[in-house]
Image (cartoon, rainbow, N blue to C red):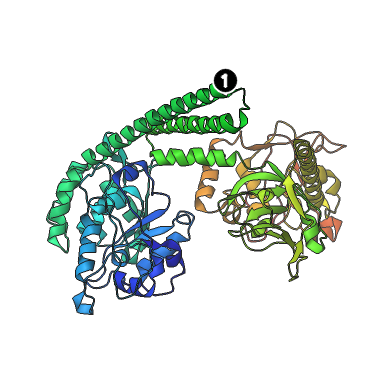
């Protein structure tokens, strides 16, 4: 198979054929063997990617490089970053293209047939040194039991699959066969749809003309193949409009489709037999080790000799045997549990391994010591495990909230959050093998920032923080967060009223946190303090609010488009009483009258002369016609009810 890192950095327009790659880049290949037992367990799903694609031309699968571009994009995406090996037919199997001068030798022809249909044969080249003119030999390894199967079945059933969908993809035999296989997973009862389950392994990328309606074509392909049984797949692919370049491929592969259920069932039976054999063998090893230990103890007692030299090694051997027996039982139980839960056994094993690995992560780290300068000094102190993964490793967040320790791919870096995972920061520990920075004996380096060189810091140490240190740090962080929230809230309140002026400023300031304030902080708009019996519908309140553009439906810019506008409109109509501003009486009623006062918009120009300030008085709770200005990009001031300049009332 081709190394994924080779493809990630390959600079060519399209991928060369196998023979050219072998001659120019022999180190790009890795030997992989696969059998159906590994397929049904999901052994290769995480690390191997198989490409399902159509040849765009008879002599060139990817003339414009669109397929290679899609493959490289997937390999650097979150879904493909863990892929280590890639299988693609033209680049992984010897090709025969006489029209372009590419001739397959006898050995290449034999290898091609082995790759295509040999019983569980090696998939590709071995990673070995050989002359460019001499084809490497494949080393097929039979599986147990030796199921007769096409290699392609194992590739697309047992690995992650990238489907490169173009407008002619669904007209071809091989592409549709591969798509169906990619949407299945193996169970003890045969194949089952993996779509919308944890076992899903396929990724569909639409290219060429299909890219314009990506969602439509992806859904159509999934709907076509997701739930088809082997018999239904056989019937569909047997139809004459499903074409294939080499008719013998179709004749040879079709009969094997109907046998797939029996094939995977046999693989599960073989795994079960292996697990039982392992449990029995490990239990026997424990009994033998126990007998040897008891014999050694008796001999030492009879000879009145010290037990150290003879008994201790026997005790250690017994402990190892017991450990293997426990592991064998656990493997059998996990396999059974995976089947019961309907997931690939290897998926459950990886989840268990991930949990065990996470249990080893230190909950907190402490960095101290060293002679640091500049920005590097901010990174001394306590860090708490954050829970996120950066480049596949845990990250720790400083109690100051702004500094982090994360893995860059080659080193542990103390860095700001904006640079997480990058090779940028102020402290660096170059030790990719260390599971966490406290486990490394390497020397830290520090940079003061602003282009400063890295300097060795042998006295700088990273250790696991104690529970008491973490508890104190967490309490301090909670307190600091509360203070920061209070400070932000106070600043927001002050900013909303600091520029209020005019005769109504004192009356409106207490209401500012609850009502609309102009964007420049110099006007309060739509504050309607009235009697408690008065309700101002929410949609009308919006019409008075400059932050929402004086729009009863809400501003597009503020609410994010037509959908939210329509939803809010319906909501305000249906729940007017529930979405209303219930105004308080105590802060709004004038001191010398029972009449309620509506504090209307106060534009900055109105403050220049107090006489320009306009008031609108509500006589009682039944007279509540609120009169906003005509809608414009700049909200207009209110006019007294009944004046010549007053616009039509809203009620």
Q: Does residue 647 appear in the picture of this structure? A: no
Q: How many marks?
A: 1
- Residue pointed to by mark 1: 302
User: Residue 133 is drawn in which quadrant?
Assistant: bottom left
The quadrant holding residue 339 is: top left
Question: If the image is split into quadrants, where does the N terminus sit?
Answer: bottom left
Residue positioned 83% across, 55% down in the render: 499
Dot 1 surroundings within 10 Å: few (below 14), some, or many (20 or more)?
few
Question: Would residue 196 be found to the left or right of residue 265 on screen?
Answer: right
On the image, the x and y values in percent for residue 262 come to 21, 38
For the residue pair 588 and 443, the one nearer the viewer reads as: 443
Comparing 88 with 173, the one in front is 88
- The quadrant of the image that shows the C terminus is top right
Q: Is residue 216 left or right of residue 314?
A: left
Please indicate, yes or no, whether residue 490 appears anywhere in the rendered image: yes
Q: Position of residue 539 (x, y in %)?
A: 60, 44
Q: Nearer the viewer, residue 570 or 172?
A: 172
Looking at the image, residue 595 sits to the left or right of residue 201; the answer is right
Q: Residue at x 43, y 71 (%)?
A: 10
| Residue 567 percent coordinates (x, y) | 52, 44
Q: Position of residue 7 (x, y in %)?
A: 42, 66
Secondary structure under the numbered disc 1 in the rendered image = helix
């Amino acid at each position: 198979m081709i190394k994924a890192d080779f493809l990630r950095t390959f600079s060519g327009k399209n991928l060369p054929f196998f023979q050219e790659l072998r001659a120019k880049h022999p180190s790009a290949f890795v030997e992989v063997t696969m059998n159906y037992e590994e397929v049904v367990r999901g052994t290769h799903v995480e690390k191997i990617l198989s490409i399902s694609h159509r040849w765009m031309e008879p002599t060139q699968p990817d003339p414009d490089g669109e397929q290679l571009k899609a493959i490289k994009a997937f390999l650097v995406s979150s879904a493909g970053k863990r892929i280590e090996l890639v299988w693609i037919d033209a680049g992984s199997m010897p090709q025969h293209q006489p029209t372009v001068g590419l001739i397959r030798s006898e050995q290449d022809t034999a290898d091609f047939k082995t790759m295509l249909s040999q019983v569980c044969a090696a998939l590709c080249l071995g990673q070995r040194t050989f002359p460019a003119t001499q084809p490497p030999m494949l080393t097929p390894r039979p599986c147990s039991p030796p199921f007769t199967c096409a290699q392609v079945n194992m590739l697309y059933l047992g690995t992650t699959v990238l489907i490169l969908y173009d407008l002619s993809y669904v007209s071809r035999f091989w592409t549709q066969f591969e798509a169906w296989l990619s949407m299945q997973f193996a169970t003890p009862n045969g194949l089952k749809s993996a779509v919308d389950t944890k076992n899903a392994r396929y990724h569909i990328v639409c290219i060429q003309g299909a890219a314009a309606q990506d969602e439509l074509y992806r859904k159509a392909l999934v709907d076509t193949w997701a739930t088809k049984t082997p018999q239904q797949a056989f019937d569909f692919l047997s139809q004459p409009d499903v074409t294939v370049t080499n008719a013998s491929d179709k004749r040879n592969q079709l009969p094997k489709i109907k046998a797939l259920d029996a094939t995977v069932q046999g693989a599960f039976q073989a795994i079960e037999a292996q697990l039982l054999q392992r449990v029995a063998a490990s239990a026997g090893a424990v009994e033998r080790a126990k007998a040897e230990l008891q014999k050694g103890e008796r001999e030492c007692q009879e000879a009145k000799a010290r037990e150290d030299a003879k008994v201790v090694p026997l005790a250690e051997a017994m402990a190892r045997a017991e450990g293997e027996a426990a592991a064998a039982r656990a493997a059998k139980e996990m396999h059974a549990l995976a089947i019961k839960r309907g997931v690939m056994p290897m998926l459950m094993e990886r989840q268990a391994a991930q949990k065990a690995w996470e249990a080893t992560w230190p909950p907190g780290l402490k960095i101290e010591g060293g002679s640091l300068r500049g920005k590097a000094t901010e990174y001394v102190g306590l860090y708490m495990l954050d829970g996120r993964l950066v480049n596949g490793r845990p990250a720790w967040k400083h109690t100051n909230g702004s500094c982090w320790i994360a893995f860059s791919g080659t080193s542990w870096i103390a860095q700001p959050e904006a640079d997480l995972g990058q090779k940028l920061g102020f402290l660096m520990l170059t030790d990719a093998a260390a599971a966490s920075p406290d486990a490394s004996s390497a020397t830290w380096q520090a940079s003061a920032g602003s282009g400063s060189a890295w300097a060795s810091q042998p006295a700088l140490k990273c250790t696991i923080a104690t529970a008491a240190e973490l508890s104190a740090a967490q309490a301090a962080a909670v307190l600091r967060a509360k203070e920061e929230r209070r400070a932000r809230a106070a600043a927001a309140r002050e900013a909303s009223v600091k520029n209020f002026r005019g005769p109504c400023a004192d009356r409106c300031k207490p209401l500012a946190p609850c009502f609309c304030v102009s964007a420049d902080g110099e006007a309060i708009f739509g504050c309607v303090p009235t009697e408690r019996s008065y309700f101002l519908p929410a949609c009308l309140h919006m019409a008075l609010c400059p932050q929402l553009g004086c729009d009863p439906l809400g501003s597009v810019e503020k609410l994010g488009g037509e959908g939210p506008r329509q939803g809010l409109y319906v909501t305000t109509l249906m729940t007017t009483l529930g979405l209303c501003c219930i105004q308080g009486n105590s802060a709004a009623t004038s001191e010398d009258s029972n009449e309620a006062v509506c504090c209307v918009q106060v534009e900055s120009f109105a403050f220049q002369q107090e006489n320009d300030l306009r008031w609108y008085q509500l006589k009682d709770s039944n007279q509540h016609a609120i009169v906003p200005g005509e809608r414009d990009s700049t909200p207009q001031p209110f006019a007294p009810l009944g004046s010549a300049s007053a616009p039509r009332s809203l009620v």
